[in-house]
Image (tube, helix red, strand yellow):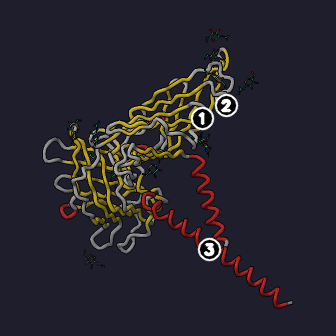
Amino acid sequence: MFWCAFVVLFLALGNELHLSHTTEVSVNSTENKLCLYANLMVNFSVTYEVGVNKSETVLFVLPENVTTEGSTCKNTTSTLKLGFGDWHSWVVEFTKDNKTYQVDSIVFTYNLNDSSVFTNSTSNETKSVTTKPRITNVGVDTYYSCKSENVQRVESVTQTLYDVTLQAFVTNGSKSDTDTVCAADLTSTTVAPTTTVTTTAAPTSTPTLPTPTTGNYSIAPDFNSTACLMATFGLRIGFKQGDKVETINLVPSATNVSGACGVNSSNLTLTSDTIKIMFTFSNDSKKFHLHALNVTVKPATGAAVVAVNTNMSIWAAAVGSSYMCNKEQTLTVTDTLTLYTFKLRVQPFGVEKGEFATAHECSLDDTSILIPVIVGAALACLILIVVIAYVIGRRKTYVGYQTL
Ligand SMILES: *[C@@H]1O[C@H](CO)[C@@H](O)[C@H](O)[C@H]1NC(C)=O
Ligand SMILES: *[C@@H]1O[C@H](CO)[C@@H](O)[C@H](O)[C@H]1NC(C)=O
Ligand SMILES: *[C@@H]1O[C@H](CO)[C@@H](O)[C@H](O)[C@H]1NC(C)=O
Ligand SMILES: *[C@@H]1O[C@H](CO)[C@@H](O)[C@H](O)[C@H]1NC(C)=O
Ligand SMILES: *[C@@H]1O[C@H](CO)[C@@H](O)[C@H](O)[C@H]1NC(C)=O
Ligand SMILES: *[C@@H]1O[C@H](CO)[C@@H](O)[C@H](O)[C@H]1NC(C)=O
Ligand SMILES: *[C@@H]1O[C@H](CO)[C@@H](O)[C@H](O)[C@H]1NC(C)=O
Ligand SMILES: *[C@@H]1O[C@H](CO)[C@@H](O)[C@H](O)[C@H]1NC(C)=O
Ligand SMILES: *[C@@H]1O[C@H](CO)[C@@H](O)[C@H](O)[C@H]1NC(C)=O
Ligand SMILES: *[C@@H]1O[C@H](CO)[C@@H](O)[C@H](O)[C@H]1NC(C)=O
Ligand SMILES: *[C@@H]1O[C@H](CO)[C@@H](O)[C@H](O)[C@H]1NC(C)=O
Ligand SMILES: *[C@@H]1O[C@H](CO)[C@@H](O)[C@H](O)[C@H]1NC(C)=O
């Protein structure tokens, strides 16, 4: 019973927290099919005049309840227009080219005549500010995902976007389940928010390439020992050559494995004719994560592409466990090179008996599993409570008749 109450409470709280903050909207095309989707949070800070040389700063959030009138979806351009309160609006313009789409601008319009927000404003005008957040190179048919804060400051307005999920140019009327994660979510150090303006995956994979074969890689400290590092995944690399985006799969059977296990860091290097990639994992004694990537691709024609990122903080899990992600993951290494992993499982430290330890699953995997599990558990609880109540009720009436 206690467990039940806990689950129910957790559900209630979860819903409360979720619903009270995010703004979720869908826009349908003229054929009444979903064509634009957004679920995000925006905080605004606006400084306005309240007297001669006197100003006030007001903070407010994009409300949950917004209108989408004026939003449009066209072949290569789309507009998301969110109206709220007393004639305030937040308008996002998208454009698309062959394989990617981007946000061109965000125009925030606020009405200083709304005295419920801008108390004592000397002006009753409507003002607008335009920003250009770096939400670019989002793969067509993927959604843009960025939990990190993206801070935009223009004139007297500061907008903070966070927990953003966005998909424009939705095809077939249903949201994609593949994401393009912003670079800020992939790197560890979140320095001053202003400098971590988000960038996204540069190249996107060509759909013509088959899913890469899953390879099994392991490193042992010496010939006699069992593995100290294990990894299994399929790997695709997308890289820019001039304006063109090329993709290439790593072929496990033609790949040489090397590396070393250390106390604080472990390395895995995979080398094929065309690809050399080194993964560096670090261990802070409690948790491990992928810390650095050094990728060299030698295409059939053209110069080699080298991408190094020593500031990553992904694939994190407790030391002694493994990290797992069955869904395709997109990792932006640099502006010119992106990795796509498939059916991933890694354990860079503390492997015992040559077997993976229990897995920490990526959020992509577990949200899809967790929600039905929670809902199921809550339903089971409800049924249990009803049955118990019924049994107790029955017993009482039964006992009552007996004594008479
Ligand atoms: C959008 O279209 C879906 C069906 O494709 C429909 O269920 C939904 O009600 C529509 N939404 C609006 C706001 O018209
Ligand atoms: C946004 O505003 C809300 C309410 O004022 C606050 O709780 C939250 O921490 C803010 N978030 C960010 C990222 O500034
Ligand atoms: C307002 O500020 C300006 C310059 O900052 C100053 O010259 C002016 O005297 C100030 N006016 C008042 C009424 O304080
Ligand atoms: C949302 O806004 C509409 C119109 O502005 C209003 O009729 C409706 O009651 C609001 N809903 C909630 C839940 O605030
Ligand atoms: C938009 O795309 C549809 C189908 O892909 C095509 O029939 C139509 O001509 C396009 N419209 C414009 C303005 O490009
Ligand atoms: C891709 O875009 C370029 C211009 O940006 C255009 O010339 C080319 O035809 C497009 N390719 C396809 C397959 O649409
Ligand atoms: C400002 O709001 C008041 C009511 O609050 C309204 O009467 C007035 O017309 C508005 N002025 C402008 C310029 O919108
Ligand atoms: C607005 O002005 C009135 C009178 O000048 C003052 O009492 C009140 O505190 C002001 N409100 C704000 C939010 O500044
Ligand atoms: C508000 O706007 C009207 C004209 O739209 C103007 O006549 C009035 O003086 C303004 N009020 C304030 C307080 O600025
Ligand atoms: C370890 O390796 C050595 C030779 O490298 C071999 O003689 C020995 O039997 C091995 N020990 C085990 C337990 O396999
Ligand atoms: C892994 O590689 C890095 C960079 O090349 C190096 O500093 C580190 O010592 C290596 N770790 C091990 C355990 O060899
Ligand atoms: C990346 O790897 C290449 C060759 O594998 C090496 O020459 C280069 O020094 C490495 N870069 C870093 C920053 O470790």
Q: Quadrant of the N terminus?
A: bottom right
Quadrant assignment, res 95: top left
Residues 72 and 144: in front is: 72
Callout 2 secondary element: loop
Judged left or right of residue 271, residue 388 is: right
Type of the residue with mark 2: Ser
Question: The residue under label 1 is which amino acid type?
Answer: Gly
Is 59 placed above or below 155 here? below
Please name the amino acid that badge 3 sits on.
Answer: Ile
Count residues near mark 2 (Cα–Cα under 10 Å), then give few for <14, some for 14-19, many for 20+: few
Reading the image, the residue beneath label 1 is 85
Residue at left offset 46%, top offset 35%: 70
Q: Residue at x 42, y 36 (%)?
A: 79
> Which of 23 and 270 lies nearest the eye of the viewer?
23
CA neighbours of label 1 inside 10 A, class few (<14), some (14 to 19), many (20+) = some
The residue labelled by disc 3 is: 383
| x and y percentages locating residue 176 in the rendered image | 38, 52
Residue 39: % across, % down = 49, 46
Q: Horizontally, is 217 left or right of 264 in the view?
A: left
Gap in angstroms between the C-alphas marked 1 and 2: 9 Å
Q: Earlier in the sequence, mark 1 or mark 3?
A: 1
| Label 3 Cα crowd, 10 Å radius (few <14 / some 14-19 / many 20+) | few
**Element on which disc 1 rests:** loop
Q: Which residue is mark 2?
A: 116
Contact (CB < 8 A) between labels 1 and 2? Answer: yes
User: Could you tell me which quadrant the C terminus lies in?
Assistant: bottom right
- Residue 1 lies left or right of residue 68; in this view the side is right
Q: Are marks 2 and 3 in contact (CB under 8 Å)?
A: no
Q: Nearer the viewer, residue 26 or 117?
A: 26
Residue 69, compared with residue 317, is above or below; it is above
